Amino acid sequence: MRKKRWVYPSLIMWNKKKNLIQMERIEEKIKEKTEAVLKSMKGNFSLEGLDIQTTNGTSSIKIYVQKTGGITIDDCASISEKMSVHLEVDGFISGSYRLEVSSPGIEKKVAK
């Protein structure tokens, strides 16, 4: 006979709130590092958006960047390489992750 397991809603809510707070801290740290990387690069770059989602232990990090005169694929690659080093060394993300750096695109609303 199988024992019943009791689940306490308050404990579940606490865990969800704790995870949400952790994600907010991680997002803030990644935002700070991204802005520092952009500032160190030649050109007038700006961070237009950041999207972090975690599914089955894998994090998806999308960084949207703009540059005066337009951003190139080489700019995105350079930012991606520099951010990968920060993510690996600083250990913001536990487990595997996928990093995407791109312009916001025409269809994406630009945040001010």
Image (spheres, grey):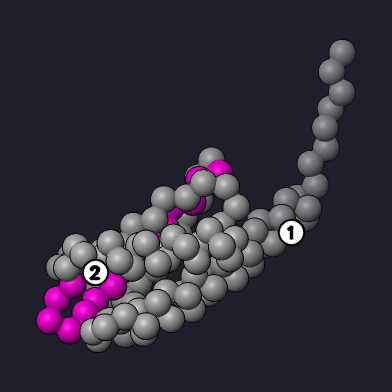
In the picture, the disc for residue 14 is 1
For residue 86, side relative to residue 98 (left or right): right
Q: Residues in magenta? A: 57-71
Q: In this view of the protein, which residue sits in the foreground, 12 or 91?
A: 91
Task: Indicate yes or no whether the magenta region holds residue 80.
Answer: no
Badge 2 density bin: few <14, some 14–19, many ≥20, Cα 10 Å: many
Q: Is the residue under label 1 in contact with that under label 2 (CB below 8 Å)?
A: no
**Where does label 2 land, which residue?**
75
The answer to whether residue 60 is magenta is: yes
Q: Gap in Å between the C-alphas at discs 2 and 1?
A: 41 Å
Say what amino acid the circle numbered 2 marks.
Asp
Give residue 27's position: percent from left, percent from top: 51, 69
Element type at marker 1?
A: helix
Specify whether residue 111 is in view: no
Image quarter for residue 40?
Answer: bottom left
Q: Earlier in the sequence, mark 2 or mark 1?
A: 1
For residue 16, what is the image quadrant? bottom right
Establish if 15 lies above or below 75. Answer: above
Type of the residue with mark 1: Trp
Which residue shows up at 64% across the image and 67% down it?
21
The image shows residue 99 at horizontal and vertical percentages of: 39, 56
Residue, x 24% and y 69% (percent of image)? 75
Q: Residue at x 32, y 85 (%)?
A: 112
Q: Residues within 10 Å of mark 1 (few under 14, many from 20)?
A: few
Callout 2: SS: helix
Residue 29, horizontal then vertical, whole percent: 54, 73
What type of secondary structure mainly makes up the magenta span? strand
